[in-house]
Amino acid sequence: MYQTNYIRASSTNDAIAKLGDDGKLIAGGMTLLPIMKQRLARPKMLVDLADCGLAGIEDLGDTIKIGSMTTHVDVETSQIVANGIPALATLAAKIGDRQVRNRGTIGGSIANNDPSACYPSAVLALRATIHTSNRDIVADDFFMGMFETSLEDNEIITAISFPKPTAAAYAKFPNPASRFAMVGVFVAKSETVRVAVTGAGEDGVFRHEALEIALTDLFAPDAVESIIISSDELINDIHAPRDYRAHLIKEMTKRAVTACNQSQFVS
Amino acid sequence: MAIVDFKFNGESVSADVPDNTLLVDFIRETLGKTGTHVGCDTSQCGACVIHLNGVSIKSCTMLAVMANGQEITSIEGIAGGKRMHPMQEAFHENHGLQCGFCTPGMIMSAIELVSNKPNLTEQEIREGLEGNLCRCTGYHNIIQSVQSAARAMRED
């Protein structure tokens, strides 16, 4: 790792002031530190958000608000999440391994927008709102492509608000070594159905309109049987060819819908 | 340079090290406690697992300075005097190791796993240890060790 300077911020304003021209924010560090060790990133300054008071989970009635520094384990084991959006707890429990979940944060995952990360699919399917140090961004305007978001320089995610759905489930086909999603599908049902796919798209997480229309019409696994999933613009790598990923999108969608219909209904 | 200052196995430690010093390197090189191992250095193998405020983390993927003001426990800090921790005892009794390189990390992860849920199924133990790799592939006895330790820790 190249030499760097580490500093802790006491608030988001303090963090922005300390960032400078070539600084990076660090949350759990589960992505940033490995890429710094590979010398793919060389920030002059690391500004730690640990002391900015950004962790915590709140039940706001129709929504659950999760602070950006909340770890995956805290989401996985939260009673508020288990009661309101159990699919989100299931998703968090399947990220990486226990040691990664003890450090990794929801804000870090979303800001990084790894094309194979799990959280972006939940944020997009549940129509979450991303609160930042200067504004609120709706999920549909947030993810801008692989490792790209609409966050500006010196803008810090403070929390994410998830509206509670009528039903939701996440089905993931993990890479057996890394536990990243080879394909992950998050299905959320409220008045309409939203289907967000991660792990598969060359441009990162995306909504699948044809699946959404079919499932809004009939919320059953059979409803997607006749949908043709295009493999255009899907990731093609040593783990899975793009045709296989297209197949997995339909399969994971069916599994998620089945899970919704069996046990995931919440009021 | 950064001042690193935290509780290590119950004692206060402090040293001035470069900001980019990894926690595992601080523990091994600065504190001289080499029970915590470096296997892959890419947060996959789990040989470097220690406890940070009681939860397991990979010390190769944290800067030493990030641990300031917190409590760290390494494999050297879990025994009670000359009496081994029940998890260490179980690995000894069940021969839960072959070369032993992964063992400190396995034990640190397994302690947290069993503390969170004393009645684990074999499947839950296997999944719970997914962040720890044994290149000898000696998983069978490792699982037996954790099951045996879980029984002992329940009786304690």
Image (spheres, rainbow, N blue to C red):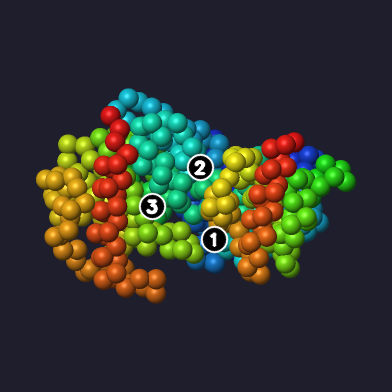
For disc 3, the marked residue is A118
Q: Are marks 2 and 1 on the same chain?
A: yes
Secondary structure of the residue carrying tag 3 is: loop
- Say whether residue B117 is left or right of residue A239: right
| Residue at position x 76%, y 45% in the image | B86
- x%, y% of residue A115? 36, 59
**Tag 2: amino acid:** Val
For disc 1, the marked residue is A34
**Tag 1: amino acid:** Pro
- The mark nearer the N terminus, 2 or 3, is 2
- Badge nearest the viewer, 3 or 1: 3
| Residue at position x 62%, y 54% in the image | B58
- Say whether residue A26 is left or right of residue B37: left
For disc 2, the marked residue is A73
Q: In this rendered view, identify the residue nearer to me: A110 or A234.
A: A234
Given the image, what chain letter belongs to the residue carrying mark 3? A
